[in-house]
Each structure stands twice: as C-alpha cells, then as structure tokens.
Amino acid sequence: MLKSPQINGKDRLRWQLGERVKELTALHRTALILNNSQRSPAHTLRSLAQAIARAWQFSEVAAVKITWAGKNYPSNGYRKTRWSQKADIKVAPGRAGSIEVCYLKPRPPAYRGPFLKEEVLLLNSLTVMIKTYLQNAVYQEHQAKAKEVLKWQIRKRTGDLTNANASLRRELALGRRRERQIKAYQEQLKSLAEKLSTAEERERREIATDLHDHIGQGLAMIKLKLQTMQGQTGHIGLGREIEEIKELSQQAIKYIRGLIFELSPLVVYELGFGAALQWLADHYWQKYKMRVVIRTTGRSRALGEDLRILLFKSVQELLINSVKHGRATRAEVIVRWVPQRLDIKVRDHGTGFGRVTNGEFKPDLKSFGLFNLKERIVQYGGQLTVNSRPGQGALVTISVATKPGAKK
C-alpha cells in the first residue's frame, strides 16, 4: 500500500493512481526499448537508465545506473548516494551486472529506506525483463560467433573437398586408364591362352596321329609277322623266344594306345561327343574297374571342335579325380541339352572333399587341376560349380552356351 502522510482521501487515491500509471508507463517504455532490435545493447541500456529514473515516486531527484559486463550505463546526473536500492543481473559465467536506483537528495522513509514496496517490486520486474534481453543478446552474440566459425569451417572444408575432389578425379581417370590397360592385357592374355591351347591341342593331335599311324601300326605289323614266324620256326626251337617278343610287342601296343589317349582323344574327332563319352566310360571300366553311367536328356546339337575337346577333357579330368583322389568305384555323367546351353553333371560316390563354400571351390596344391579346369571353362564363357562334403562324394556341374554349325 502506497503511503504518504501529507495526502488523504481522494487526493490519496489520485496520487496512488498516478504512481501506478508511472510504473505501468515505465514497464511499457522498457518493453518498447527492449523490442527495438535496431539498437545496440549499449544504446539500449543507456535509454533504459533514462526511462527507469522517471518511474520512481520522487523522479525529479531519482537517478539510475545499469552495469553490464564491466561497463556502466548511468542516467543523467547519476552519482553514488546512500539512498539507493539495487538488483543483480546474472546471465552466464563472466556475464553479470546490476540495476541501481538512487535518490540524489534525502527523502522521507517508506517501505525500504525512502523506497516504496511497489518500487521494490517494480525494480525486480524490470530486472527480469532486462535479464531476459541480455540473455538473448548473449545468445545472439554466441550464435553470431558460431556462424562465423561455421562459415570459416565451411570455406575451409569446401576448399579441402574441392582439392580432394580434383585429386579423386585425377585418381579415377588414372584408374580408368589402368583398368583399360589391364582389360587390354587380359584380352591379350586370353587370346594368347586360346591360341596356345589350340596350338598345343593341334600338336598333341599330330603327335598322337603319328604314334597311331606309324609306331602303333608298325608294332601291330610286327606282332602279325611274329605270329606267322611262330608257326614256321617251331621245329627249330624258337617258339618260346618269339612268344616273348609277341608279348613285349603287345605291351608296347597297349602303352602306345594309352599314350595316344592321354595326348589327344582321337575318338572325339572320329566318333563325336556323345559316342566319345560312352567310349570313355568303357575305357575307365577296363582300366580302373570304375563303373561310369552316361545319361543324356534333350535333343543334341552341333558343337564346335574346341568346345567338344574342352568338354571331353573336362569330363575325363573329373573322372580321373574321382578315381585317384576320391577312390570312387562308380560315377554318373549326366548330359542335359537345353535351348542355347549344355549342362554336364559329373557325380561320384567317393570320399569327397571339404574346401567348397556355396559352390565356390577354394583350391590348394592337391586340387590345382580342378581350379585350372574351372578357369578354362570360365574363359570359354561357361560356369563350373562344385558341391562336395567329406564322405559324401562330389557333384561337379559344367554349364556352357552352345553354338550351331560344328560336327557333333
């Protein structure tokens, strides 16, 4: 309650109303000043000091000083007196201040010194408003500094990325050139490998033909001659010696035939792919006592000579693996003709092996032949997959595209 011993009745009410208007005007003017974003904090605090001084009961002798961040912003005529009230402002560490209101001359005592209770509450309200403004100013200051730091970081990062991007483009261009070179080298190596394989096969075939036509037939004629001589010279005691020579000739003929088969499967050229597989099954039964069953489905088509030789040798090598490494006594060769493709499955019932993951064979020194076989199939544009487990045999699948126009 406002008090004044000199004022009574209606005059007292008018006086109270006037004081309240002064307080509301001070609050309103403070809000207007704080909301003016065009002013700097220093200019704002000086304007507030002038406005606040007019809100007190004895405004003609009132003065205000606002302190913030080590700087003072006083109203006109301010000086330090013993008739004052003060409120502290704390925003952040190192960011603090205060609002001090004083009378320049002695005034009658009231609620707290010469100040009314309402003036104490008014100072607290003004302090809250100014504190909020200063907090926002500190935040904007920090935000502005953060933006500058961010801009600097962005500029630096953009420069780094530009340099890195340019370096990456150079590396990519170099990588593409190297990739083209490697691809060209691979094509050259593939072409050389194909030419080498063709030349090797041609040489093998010529050697096998020479062995068959000359040495093999020569040995056969020697055997026939010996048979003729054996009947004519029995009375002079040479029959035993001739029989031994015949036996040696037969062993040489058998060895020559095996060598011819290993060098070049002439049967593929003479009989065709399907008949050659059946001949191969008979050969493995006679030589290794392994039963090989040939099953064919679909309508057979023409195969090029290179592909016929590759597939025949592949089946031959897989059966050799079954005998030598898998110790198999029986196997199946399933030939499946489908449109534009030929699938060959070689399944044995031997010991199997364990270095297979999802059909991908992982070679070691003992199985390099199988790995090499896969590489030859892949070079021809085909696929080779292996499924095997220890003790459960092995299943090898070869899949190649077929092209018409060659001998079956």
Image (tube, rainbow, N blue to C red):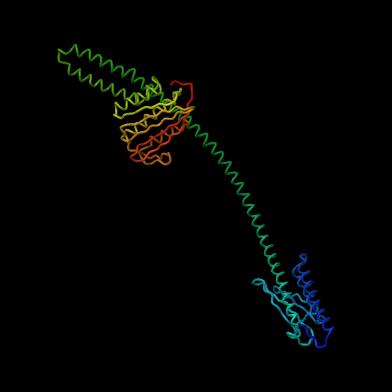
Residue 404 % position (x, y): 48, 23
The percent coordinates of residue 217 (x first, y second) are 31, 17
Query: Residue visible at 62% across and 52% down?
Result: 160
Q: Name the quadrant containing residue 149.
A: bottom right
In the rendered image, the residue lying farthest to the front is: 9
Q: In the rendered image, which quarter contains the N terminus?
A: bottom right
- Quarter occupied by the C terminus: top left
Quarter occupied by residue 251: top left
Q: Residue at x 43, y 41 (%)?
A: 358
Side of 218 relative to 50 (left or right): left
Q: Nearer the viewer, residue 276 or 93?
A: 276
Judging depth in this view, the residue of 210 and 265 nearest the camera is 265
Residue at (65% x, 71% y) in the render: 92
As drawn, 66 above or below 301:
below
Total numbered circles: 0
User: What is the x, y in percent for residue 330?
Assistant: 32, 31
Task: Name the outermost residue toward the right.
Answer: 11
Looking at the image, residue 172 lies above or below residue 126:
above
Q: In terms of image quadrants, where is residue 245?
A: top left
Q: Is residue 233 left or right of residue 320?
A: left
Classify residue 44 as left or right of residue 270. right
Q: Residue 125 in the image: x percent, y percent?
A: 73, 75
